[in-house]
Image (tube, helix red, strand yellow):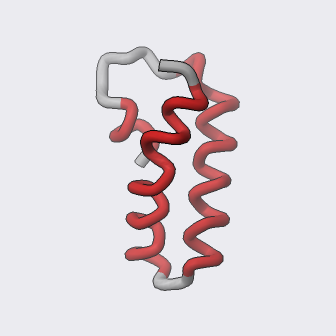
């Protein structure tokens, strides 16, 4: 799975999770974007032993 697929697959779930924590849509979106930015920078560290969703969350 390439990073674009990961983004497309998990963005909405991660966004909803962040929204439930922050209750502010703008903050939730910003945190979600930041999460994917950091994930992109460190995707080489993901060893695949766990579910990518757990790693993102």
Residue found 55% across the figure and 83% down from its top: 24
Position of residue 22 measured from the top left corner of the image (x, y, whole percent):
49, 79
Most foreground residue, 33 or 42: 33
Query: In the rendered picture of this protein, how many numbered marks are placed on residues?
Result: 0
* Residue 52 figure quarter: top left
Residue found 55% across the figure and 20% down from its top: 2
Say above or below: 3 vs 15. Answer: above
Q: Is residue 37 left or right of residue 13?
A: right
Position of residue 48 measured from the top left corner of the image (x, y, whole percent):
37, 17
Say above or below: 54 vs 13. Answer: above
* Residue 49 figure quarter: top left
Residue found 46% across the figure and 73% down from its top: 19
Say above or below: 9 vs 46. Answer: below
Position of residue 21 measured from the top left corner of the image (x, y, whole percent):
42, 75
Say above or below: 28 vs 33. Answer: below
Residue farthest along the bottom direction in this orientation = 23
Most foreground residue, 3 or 35: 3
Position of residue 3 measured from the top left corner of the image (x, y, whole percent):
58, 27
Residue found 34% across the figure and 40% down from its top: 54
Residue farthest along the left direction in this orientation = 50
Most foreground residue, 6 or 46: 6
């Amino acid at each position: 799975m390439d990073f674009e697929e990961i983004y497309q697959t998990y963005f909405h779930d991660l966004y909803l999770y962040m929204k439930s924590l922050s209750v502010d849509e703008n903050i939730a979106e910003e945190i979600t974007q930041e999460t994917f930015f950091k994930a992109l920078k460190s995707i080489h560290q993901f060893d695949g032993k766990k579910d990518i969703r757990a790693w993102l969350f």
